Amino acid sequence: MMFKAISSIKVKVELKPVVDNLVFRLHYRYTYTIYMVSMLLCTIYDIIGDKISCMTGIDSDAYNDVVSNFCFIMGTFTVDRLHGVKIGAEAPHPGVGPQQPGDNVTFHTYYQWVPFVLFIQGVMFYAPHWLWKSREGGLFKQVIQDLSIRDYLGSDLRNYFGREER
């Protein structure tokens, strides 16, 4: 009686075979999603927000936009001689201040590449899953369905419990 009830439920609830494990799913679902969302947030901030604030002596907004675009393309730099000065008196921040002819400068262009690197890393986390799905072609799904534990153990369990009841 109980076995018939469970059998009728078994027919209605069909479990999909799982061909990957938890770590694999974490890589191609969650890590990929985190990287893509981070990339989108960085890109949106660059498009909507202020890309960079350049220190200029120009009061015109039209020229400020041109100079800001130039600064974004050329990158940020710090003046090496301003790293050891008194903050607030000689420089607003270590390395930030007017550049004199002959000063050594260090360029910092990393922020421009952050969205691209995040995108590439996200693709690298998703690529193994895509490669697996395209090359595997459902073979493991078929094998798992053919070797389903409910098909092979079901008859053994019925025979085992059937012998015990006698």
Image (cartoon, rainbow, N blue to C red):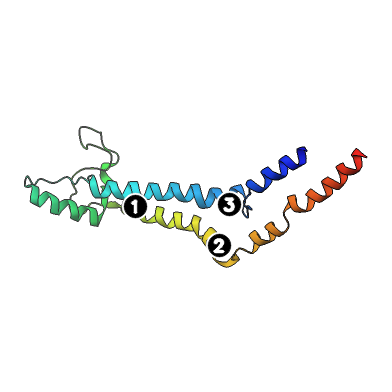
Dot 3 falls on a residue whose secondary structure is helix
User: Is 63 or 100 nearer to us in this picture?
Assistant: 63
Q: Is residue 7 above or below residue 75?
A: above
Whether label 2 touches label 3, CB < 8 Å: no
The kind of residue tagged 1 is Tyr
Q: Is residue 51 visible?
A: no
User: Percent position (x, y) of residue 22?
Assistant: 60, 47
Mark 1 = which residue?
110
What residue is shown at x 22% (from left), y 32% (from top)?
88
Between the residue at mark 3 and the residue at mark 1, the CA separation in whole angstroms equals: 30 Å
What residue is shown at x 42% (from left), y 58% (from top)?
120
Give the number of the mark in front: 3 or 1.
3
Between the residue at mark 2 and the residue at mark 3, the CA separation in whole angstroms equals: 12 Å
The kind of residue tagged 3 is Phe
Dot 2 falls on a residue whose secondary structure is helix
Mark 2 = which residue?
133
Tell me which label, 3 or 1, sits earlier in the chain: 3
User: Percent position (x, y) of residue 112?
Assistant: 31, 53
Q: Residues within 10 Å of mark 2 (few under 14, many from 20)?
A: few
User: Percent position (x, y) of residue 91?
Assistant: 22, 38
Quarter of the image for the N terminus: give it.
top right
The disc at residue 24 is 3
